[in-house]
């Protein structure tokens, strides 16, 4: 049989086929960047252990968001707060955290997405048996005057170290006249540990999100009717969270894609995932209709 291809032509065709095969093979000529998602144990957003492992609102969001970002390979990394902050600020690391509040300080070293979900604002959780200690600091609408409470130096209050509680509470904590009345918790599962310490009267109050405190109380078998939660006077009803990414060119490219996808997912998926953890689900969903009408920090 006569061979129709001359040796040079056959060699050229073979090279073209090999090149095409390599370019179509993942991890070779056109390898995608790997985006590392930094998740902290932060119920009810992310749940690392127990019977509801992986059922938090952000746990359920991540497969949805990852599926809509085929531009990247994705990996999930469980970190504590300190490690997550360190990685986000490392220019050699390409990472994002889906559960961050924006603050001016964080904005200097981290890129933030559009608002992605709204959580009821932080407040003060106490043992109901200690109600009398806090009654003088309650307003008519059952908000607590945190500034006056801390200034009185009559109770000790547990807080999570390096956490932002939003601008109103953060300002009060920074300016309190009696910093020794604040007990900082640096460990993992801080709110869970602080609830136990509160039961032992190591301190009389903790500052946290109510859905977070409720989750940990239920895991420990603490009857919810033995706790009380007070929103903080002058703090907004809701706080808006964002996805924060490395402040690099890679991070900027990722934020553009994240913003594109979260404009859809925040209203069609995430708001429903988070509503499942609300005490009053219908009220939350009703309020959610106006969450994203204007930009929020």
Image: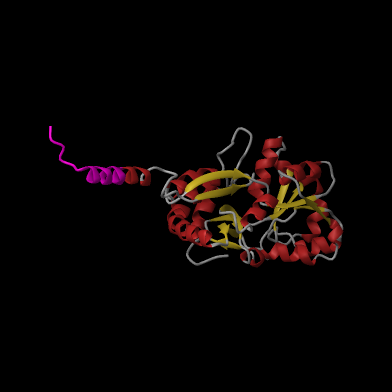
Compared with 51, 107 (above or below) is below
The percent coordinates of residue 281 (x first, y second) are 54, 48
Q: Residue at x 85, y 46 (%)?
A: 202
Q: Which residues are magenta?
A: 1-17
Q: Residue at x 83, y 49 (%)?
A: 203
Quarter of the view holding residue 240:
bottom right
Q: Give the camera-side residue of 11 and 255.
A: 11
Q: How many marks?
A: 0
Let me know if residue 240 appears in the view.
Answer: yes
In this picture, residue 129 sits left or right of residue 34 = right
Q: Residue at x 55, y 49 (%)?
A: 36
Residue 80: within the magenta?
A: no
Q: Give the camera-side residue of 246 and 197.
A: 246
The percent coordinates of residue 178 (x first, y second) are 86, 62
Dominant SS in magenta = helix
Q: Give the camera-side residue of 17 and 253.
A: 17
Quarter of the view holding residue 55:
top right
- Location of the N terminus (image quadrant): top left
């Amino acid at each position: 049989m006569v061979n129709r291809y001359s040796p040079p032509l056959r060699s050229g065709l073979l090279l073209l086929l090999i090149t095409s095969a390599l370019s179509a093979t993942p991890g070779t000529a056109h390898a995608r960047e790997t985006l590392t998602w930094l998740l902290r144990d932060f119920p009810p957003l992310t749940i690392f252990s127990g019977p509801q492992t992986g059922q938090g609102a952000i746990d359920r969001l991540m497969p949805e968001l990852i599926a809509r970002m085929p531009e990247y390979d994705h990996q999930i990394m469980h970190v504590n707060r300190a490690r997550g902050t360190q990685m986000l600020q490392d220019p050699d690391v390409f990472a994002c955290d889906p559960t961050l509040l924006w603050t001016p300080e964080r904005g200097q070293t981290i890129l933030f997405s559009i608002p992605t979900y709204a959580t009821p604002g932080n407040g003060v959780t106490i043992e109901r048996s200690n109600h009398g200690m806090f009654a003088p600091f309650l307003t008519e609408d059952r908000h607590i005057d945190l500034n006056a409470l801390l200034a009185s130096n009559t109770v000790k209050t547990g807080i999570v170290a390096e956490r932002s509680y939003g601008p109103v509470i953060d300002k009060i904590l920074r300016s309190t006249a009696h910093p020794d009345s604040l007990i900082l918790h640096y460990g993992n599962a801080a709110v869970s540990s602080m609830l136990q310490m509160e039961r032992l009267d190591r301190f009389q109050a903790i500052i946290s999100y109510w859905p977070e405190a409720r989750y940990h109380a239920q895991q420990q078998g603490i009857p919810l009717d033995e706790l009380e939660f007070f929103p903080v006077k002058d703090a907004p009803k809701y706080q808006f969270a964002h996805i924060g990414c490395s402040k690099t060119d890679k991070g900027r490219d990722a934020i553009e894609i994240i913003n594109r996808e979260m404009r859809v997912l925040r209203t069609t998926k995430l708001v429903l995932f988070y509503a499942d953890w609300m005490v009053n689900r219908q009220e939350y969903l009703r309020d959610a209709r106006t969450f994203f009408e204007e930009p929020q920090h």
